[in-house]
Image (cartoon, helix red, strand yellow):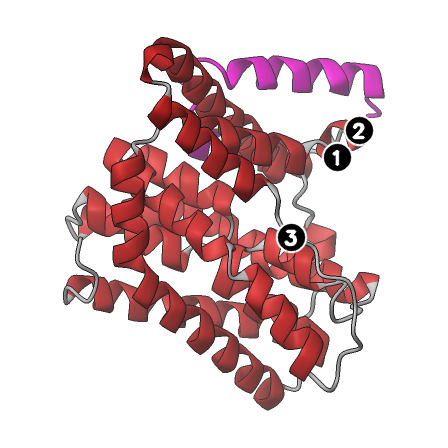
Amino acid sequence: MHISQQKIQLIYFVFVAACFMPFMSPALALLIGIGLSLLGLKHERMSGFTAVVLQASIVLMGFGMNLTQVVKASKSGFELTAISVVATISLGLLLGKLLKVDHKISVLIAAGTAICGGSAIAALAPVIRARNFQISFSLIVVFILNALALLLFPAIGHFFHLSQEAFGYWAAIAIHDTSSVVGAGASYGTKALEIATTVKLTRALWIIPVSIAFAVFDRKSEKGKIRIPWFIGLFVLALLVAHFVPQLDTTFGHLNWLGKRGMVVALLLIGSNISIADSRQAGTKSFVLGIALWLSIASISFLAIQHHLVNY
């Protein structure tokens, strides 16, 4: 049965509005989005706003964070972040060679796993001159694993009785996309959300040196343009404004709430973009690479945090 775009638009409007209600959790929004995709209810124009909604929400959430705690979280998570980024990319390239996965797909999946999912892939793709099918395959692999992480990580955290601090660090290091890191942190607790978001955005800054490294040293890639994620700068600006203008606390609280609800909207749109057909096209070897890399970083970072390598 064919449903007109006008009716699909109405369906999306209802669900987007529901994202601003207390009962709509990040995980539920993602599942609804996936359900809409499986039913063939895709709104092409709306899906184009996903990145804008995600980035704007992160900036708005910056108004509700404590600058002192953010600096502390960034410092304590820096060493583990640096080690994990370098180790994950190195392991990804090695596994890609062993599995005979296309080199550029290996680079993009490794960077997406190591840094910040789709944002890292989008930033690095023009640097290595990746073709459309290579970008699509990489995004599909990271995208699906990222959606699974949003659902699985909070359950694992509760099962092992992780503190909010420990879960925040673990989510920031082991979950691909910023959206799912924030979603998982929000469902686990306020402190977990704050640490997870801060450490993840600090991690996202690695897009810049990694892009430069591949532009300079990767002989299999041609030199391309480096894209800098400017929304990170706006997030830092929001933090500073909230810190130095405390008299506007009430307004900043409203902006922070809007950011959190906007993140739920972003997850709904992310879920609606998942395609089973595209997933099949990505190829078994690409998924094996993505899963192996994801399980490695999730397990190692979990053990590292459990053994107090991060001073939280």
Residue 207 falls inside the magenta stretch: no
Q: In the image, is 28 to the left or to the right of 284?
A: left
**245 lies left or right of 95:** left
Does the residue at mark 2 contact the one at mark 1 (Cβ under 8 Å)? Answer: yes
Which contiguous range is marked in magenta?
1-28
Query: Dot 2 surroundings within 10 Å: few (below 14), some, or many (20 or more)?
Result: few
Tell me the CA gap for discs 1 and 3: 20 Å
Residue displayed at 70% across by 74% down:
215
Please state the horizontal and vertical placement of residue 204, each as a whole percent of the image: 50, 54
Task: Tell me the CA gap for discs 2 and 1.
Answer: 5 Å
Q: Which residue is mark 2?
A: 45
Rendering coords of residue 301 (x, y %): 30, 66
Which residue sits at x=19%, y=67%? 309
Ranked by sequence position, the earlier of labels 1 and 3 is: 1
Q: Is residue 31 visible?
A: no
Within 10 Å of disc 1 (Cα), the crowding (few <14, some 14-19, many 20+) is: few
| Residue to which mark 1 is pinned | 48
Which kind of residue does numbered mark 1 sit on? Gly
Q: Which residue is mark 3?
A: 228
Please, what secondary structure does the residue beneath circle 1 have? Answer: loop
Three-letter residue code for mark 2: Arg
Q: Position of residue 279 (x, y in %)?
A: 67, 57
Q: Relative to 149, is 121 on the left or the right?
A: right
**Which is nearer the N-term, disc 2 or disc 3?**
2
